[in-house]
Amino acid sequence: MAELTAFRYHPGASILHRVDPRFKLGCLIIASMGALNGDAAALGLWSIASAALFAEMRMPLMTVARELRYFALLILLVVLARTLTAAGEPLIRFWGVALTRQGLIEGALAGWRLGLVVMLGLLFMAATRTWQVKSAVESLLKPVPFIPHKRIAAMMGLLLRFIPLILSTARDTADAQRARGIENRRNPVFRLIKLAVPLLRKTFLDADRLATAMDARCYTESRSTQPLFARGGDWAFLGAVCGLSFLALSLPCF
Amino acid sequence: MNPSPIHDSSEQLRMTVYASLMAAFIAAGAYIAVPIGPVPVVLQNMFVLLAGLLLGWRWAAAAVGVYLLAGICGLPVFAGGTGGVGRLVGPTGGYLIGYLPAAAVVGWMSERRDNNRVLDVLGLIAGTMVVYLCGVFWLKMATGMSIGKSLALGMYPFLPGDGLKIIAAAAIAGAVRPMIRKPGKVAHSHGYS
């Protein structure tokens, strides 16, 4: 079971920590699109910028790398699938499968793109508190008509809080089932039900308690949220990301 | 007796929290795997279908919508810890978009009659087909593959696992549904009739 716990807030006072969350969210959208559509030169540019932000944030990179090992495995699978399925000039043949030059390049680019998107998400989550994500979403959705922006923002904040709870409960449930010899049961439906029912029951009970606690504290959607103020530094950061994006687009392909 | 506005807002709040929880389940489902034979099968699409069974069509659509919006914003909720608009417009984006009508279809069908396992299973089958309809069509458009190859790559290999997930989802919904407090319903009532 992979972890999403690497994607959590890391306290700090880096440049990224200080940027307005709305600007950070906008920059994340721009950078993710740039990373997913870029060629090697553009990916190199975005990777250098991300590495610089990581270094400036002083994140414990070894711990993060250890927590992300499952993602590395997924990315490796994507790389292998792309490498082995692309048509082109064969370099090596084994067991009837041809490894092509084009396949190697496509596979490496696909892995690089996915890895970069994961890193960008990690940067955003490490430098942004959940309430800031909620405020940013609320603020960005406000101009959209017929959308309950406050409710959607609250739901997104809750979503981010529930993910670690679900993963840790799933791990505990799987351990408890293993201790009771679930591995001896071959029926996959039985195993699925025995994992999912306690997991859903426990988390729904927790959600029920949370709803009661919010209700008891007179939670309403009309309550005022923490105001966000854009400063010169935020606009400069957005300008830098837009500039980087234009630069990445104008770089020659190779 | 009509429910008071306070009672109504409490129920709305409870459903908002439940829908957020199901959205989180959909995100976390990409990392919760159960071995089926030698292959570990992830539970993400099962949680999409369960959202429909447990919350009804409106709140299930809200849960999937929030999940997709979180992904579009770049939050790492899509499979592989990725996010961003690029994933939605990529070759596998159709499956993600298909989750929205699929959850609504399952929810709508399960709401036709309370705790009816036959309708639940029919809804689950219809929801699964909706996901594949959107996913395979999108895969074909994005990659330019023939419909036969798109089906061979994007649907057929997953059908046995989906069949097992449908059986499991109906049983799981039957066990979990009685404890969910939905508007106008009392929790801890009886399960399937």
Image (tube, rainbow, N blue to C red):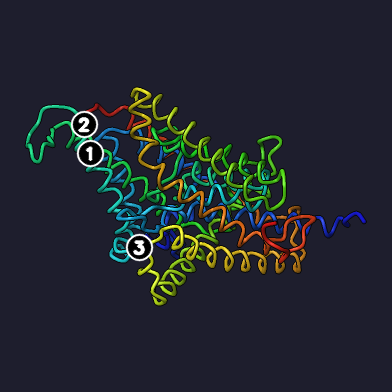
Give the letter of the chain under mark 3: A
Name the spot of residue A137 as percent of width and height, x first. 59, 47
Q: Earlier in the sequence, mark 1 or mark 2?
A: 2
Task: Please give the name of the residue rendered at 48% of the width and 56% of the height, measured from the top-left corner.
Answer: A18
Q: Earlier in the sequence, mark 3 or mark 1?
A: 3
**What residue would you read off at disc 1?**
A107
| Residue closest to the eye, B190 or A122 | B190
Give the letter of the chain under mark 2: A
Residue type, numbered disc 3: Met
Q: Are marks 3 and 1 in contact (CB under 8 Å)?
A: no
Secondary structure under tag 3 reads loop
Name the spot of residue A11 as percent of width and height, x first. 46, 65
| Residue closest to the eye, A233 or A54 | A54
| Residue closest to the eye, B186 or B73 | B186
Question: On the rendered image, what quadrant is the C terminus of chain A found in?
Answer: top left
Name the spot of residue B186 as percent of width and height, x first. 77, 62
Please give left or right for residue A149 compared with residue B24 in the image. right
Task: Please give the name of the residue rendered at 58% of the width and 49% of the height, measured from the top-left corner.
Answer: A136
The mark found on residue A222 in the picture is: none
Please give left or right for residue B159 compared with residue B127 in the image. left
**What residue would you read off at disc 2?**
A86
Secondary structure under tag 2 reads loop
Please give left or right for residue B54 compared with residue B38 in the image. right
Q: Nearer the viewer, mark 3 or mark 1?
A: 1
Dot 2: few (<14), some (14–19), or many (≥20) neighbours within 10 Å?
A: some
**What residue would you read off at disc 3?**
A59
Is residue A127 at least partly visible in the picture? yes
